[in-house]
Image (spheres, rainbow, N blue to C red):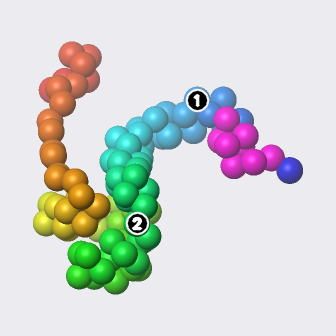
Amino acid sequence: MKTHDEMVQDWLKDPEFKAVYDALEPEFSWLDELLKARQAVGLTQAEVAERMGTKPSAVARLEAGGGSNKHSPSVATLRKYAEAVGCQLEIRLVREPKENAY
């Protein structure tokens, strides 16, 4: 039986799959930042939820992406999460390479 990573590597050989996968990279990147920040301070989702004044299920949804087409977290929610894990929220706009710019 293949591992998840092995299956993804096989799927990435398909150009259509790779294009969709690559398009999701920015979303995966910020979700990964949430997990890294929480893990760096050794907190559970329940502990972060308590610090944020919310439920563990809300933190789990936030870290899982919450279904990006269903709901995007507010800046206030992201700020609360950042504060709960001892960070500050920083939002930046990064210029696209010229071939992708408007």
Q: Is residue 7 left or right of residue 22?
A: right
Q: Is residue 17 visible?
A: yes
Residue 73: give x, y in percent of width and height.
24, 65
Q: Is residue 35 left or right of residue 21?
A: left
> Residue at the location (44% across, 70% down)?
44
**What segment is highlighted magenta in the picture?**
2-9
Residue that numbered label 2 is attached to:
43
Question: Where, quadrant-wise, is the C terminus in this rendering?
Answer: top left
Residue that numbered label 1 is attached to:
15
Q: Is residue 97 left or right of residue 61?
A: left
Is most of the magenta stretch helix, strand or loop? helix
Residue nearer the viewer, 71 or 38:
38
Q: Residue 6: within the magenta?
A: yes
Q: Marks 2/1: CA distance?
A: 39 Å
Q: Residue furthest front?
A: 41
Task: Give residue 45's quadrant in the image.
Answer: bottom left
Residue nearer the viewer, 18 or 88:
88
Element type at mark 1: helix
> Residue at the location (57% across, 38% down)?
17
- The kind of residue tagged 1 is Pro
- The kind of residue tagged 2 is Leu
